[in-house]
Image (cartoon, helix red, strand yellow):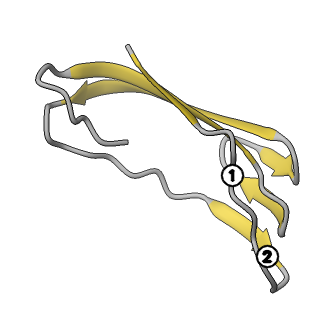
Amino acid sequence: MRNTGTLPITSWTVTFKVPTGLTYVQLNGYHPTGATVTVTQNGLLPPGNLVTVPFGIGWQGGTVGSPAPVTCTAR
């Protein structure tokens, strides 16, 4: 998540679907292919800064689809 605005963000949520080609995403629980993953964090994110959230995946090789749709909501 990157804050490209001019004001601080105090919390944010990112939502995406586990794409075809991955067997799972491990982030705040286990999510199989096609499941919706939601990440919410609270804390100050100043303008121009970014934060990354590491997570595990299951992949058996081959092509991985796009995790669409992806939504980002700042609060």
The x and y percentages for residue 28 are 67, 41
Residue situated furthest top in the rendering: 75
Question: Label 2, on which residue?
Answer: 59
Q: Secondary structure at mark 1?
A: loop
Q: Which quadrant does the C terminus fall into?
A: top left
Please tell me in which quadrant of the rendered image residue 64 appears: bottom right
- Compared across the picture, whether 23 is left or right of 38 comes to right
2, above or below 6, in the image: below
- Compared across the picture, whether 41 is left or right of 61 comes to left
Within 10 Å of disc 1 (Cα), the crowding (few <14, some 14-19, many 20+) is some
N-term mark: 1 or 2: 2
The x and y percentages for residue 68 are 69, 45
Front disc: 1 or 2: 1
4, above or below 74, in the image: below
Please tell me in which quadrant of the rendered image residue 6 appears: top left
The x and y percentages for residue 56 are 66, 63
Q: Secondary structure at mark 2?
A: strand
Question: Label 1, on which residue?
Answer: 67
Q: Which quadrant does the N terminus fall into?
A: top left
The x and y percentages for residue 43 are 30, 25
Within 10 Å of disc 2 (Cα), the crowding (few <14, some 14-19, many 20+) is some
Please tell me in which quadrant of the rendered image residue 8 appears: top left
- For the residue marked with disc 2, what is the amino acid? Trp
CA gap, disc 1 and disc 2: 14 Å
- For the residue marked with disc 1, what is the amino acid? Pro
